Image (tube, grey):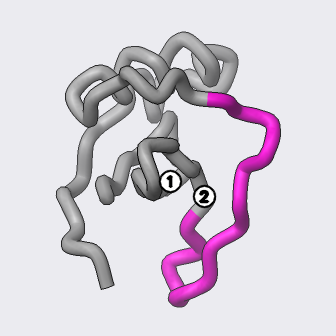
Amino acid sequence: MAKFDVFGTTMIAIQCHGQWRLSIDSGLGLRRPVKDVVFLPSLDENELVQYLADIYHEWATNRHPHIVKLSKLSAA
């Protein structure tokens, strides 16, 4: 499980049964699943930043020009 700032939007990627699942994090403990993004099962956690950048590059602004890995979260 890893948390990212994707051009100003906080997102969490969770790997479950070999599949990555992406959610938008509200910051209040709520997560909204992102269902229109499909990850290759072979992607490792370090490749997620580039993959997310390829998908969401339109979100880039002067204030949020990059994707930043915020943390690696332990599974709860």
Q: Which amino acid does label 2 sit on?
A: Ser
User: Could you say where residue 74 lies in the image, as x and y percent from the top left?
Assistant: 20, 73
User: Seen from this angle, which residue lies furthest top?
Assistant: 54
- The 10 Å Cα crowd at callout 2, few under 14, some 14 to 19, many 20 or more, is some
The span from disc 2 to disc 1 (Cα, nearest Å) is 6 Å
Seen at 80% across and 36% down, the residue is: 36
Seen at 70% across and 33% down, the residue is: 37
Q: Mark 1 points at which residue?
A: 11
Residue 56's place in the image compared with 1, above or below, is above
- Where is the C terminus found, in terms of image quarters? bottom left
Please provide the residue range marked out in magenta.
Answer: 25-38
Q: Mark 2 points at which residue?
A: 23
- Where is the N terminus found, in terms of image quarters? bottom left
Residue 27 highlighted magenta (yes or no): yes
Q: Nearer the viewer, residue 74 or 16?
A: 16
Residue 12 highlighted magenta (yes or no): no
User: Could you say where residue 60 lies in the image, as x and y percent from the top left?
Assistant: 56, 22
- Element marked by disc 2: strand
Q: Nearer the viewer, residue 48 or 11?
A: 48
Seen at 52% across and 88% down, the residue is: 29
- Element marked by disc 1: strand
User: Could you say where residue 64 lies in the image, as x and y percent from the top left?
Assistant: 45, 33
Seen at 78% across and 46% down, the residue is: 35
Q: Which amino acid does label 1 sit on?
A: Met
